[in-house]
Amino acid sequence: MRIVFFGTPAFALPSLDALLNAGEDVVAVVSQPDKRKGRDRAHTPPPVKEYALERGIEVLQPVKITDSTLMHKLSLLKPDVIVVIAYGKILRAPILMLPSYGCINVHASLLPNYRGAAPIQWAILHGDVKTGITTMLMDEGLDTGDILLQEKTDIYGDDTAESLGKRLAEMSAPILLKTLQGIEQGTLSPSPQAGTPSFAPSLKKEDGVIDWSKTARAVHNFIRGMYPWPCAYCYLNGERIKIIKATVLEGSGQPRRIQKAENELIVGTGDGLISILELQPEGKKIMSAKAFLQGRRLKEGAFFDEP
């Protein structure tokens, strides 16, 4: 089949790689425009663009999905199917109606759970123990299309959005190939989504502020779900401290109060304790809690700043 692939971040790479290795005819890749990153604010291409150019595939980067030039180019490419994985924008009717087999989206949740831009993060934030991958036939709604295939996976207690994302990305590739094979052979029947939907809106930097008044389990889930971006953080004497890794301990303490500051950094929550294992002070590298404490005169009874 002639395929146009819409994708932007590294999450989409295993699927694009699988299509090419399976001999599929990927005639073009559509990705988000380059963004300025780093201290020098240099224009940085998205991972999917870099990979596509290395493989000699034409790359399109429209600023707006409604760009008439994009629609004209897609019409000339005559795709049999459009595959969309973490592209970042909702496709409109003219594009959805273009390919003969429709547009297929690979979404990192068990729809209708977690429709939206950040399904991996929100599944961890809510303390879910299972998630998965859904392939669906796209319509104009936000992840509302009919389901083609689904596959489940466990969310482990030490999973972060990064580790779970990598696992789901790898799962996506074989499910996508199976979906395309079923569509081409006419053996897959789309099924309407059933159940009450939930939503996973995109996260902003300010969403990473830790609420220590919640339970230790909720704070732990928050830290895991926010890593690696925007990262859970709090303030100590006005300095922003990113919390990279932690664990839950039994016991009681006041929210934000540092219960122990000798070799271990233990903080009180609304119910239970959090032992901070790794953290990153502002402008410094990630370090262990022990290393952090060795360079500070931090005493038991001190408090992290109130949000």
Image: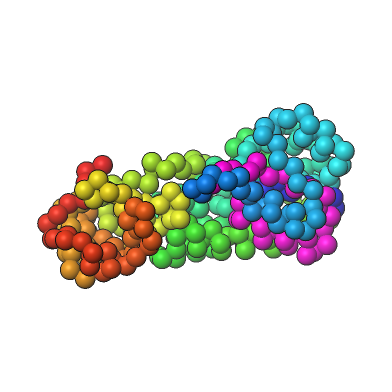
Residue at left offset 77%, top offset 28% = 68
Q: Position of residue 198 (x, y in %)?
A: 49, 42
Q: Nearer the viewer, residue 233 or 292?
A: 292
Residue 42 showing in the rendered view: yes
Q: Position of residue 178 (x, y in %)?
A: 74, 60
Residue at left offset 62%, top offset 63% = 170
Q: Is residue 209 left or right of residue 160?
A: left
Q: Position of residue 108 (x, y in %)?
A: 57, 53
Q: Quadrant of the C terminus?
A: top left
Q: Magenta span covers which residues?
A: 9-37
Q: Is residue 73 above or below residue 300?
A: above
Q: Is residue 300 left or right of residue 241?
A: left
Q: Residue furthest front?
A: 40
Q: Nearer the viewer, residue 123 or 79?
A: 79
Residue at left offset 72%, top offset 61% = 17
Residue 51 lies in quadrant:
bottom right
Residue 205 lies in quadrant:
top left
Q: Nearer the viewer, residue 174 or 55?
A: 55
Number of numbered discs: 0
Q: Is residue 157 above or below residue 211?
A: below
Residue 268 lies in quadrant:
bottom left
Residue 259 showing in the rendered view: no
Residue at left offset 38%, top offset 41% = 206
Q: Is residue 173 above or below residue 90?
A: below
Magenta stretch encompasses residue 14: yes
Q: Position of residue 63 (x, y in %)?
A: 67, 34
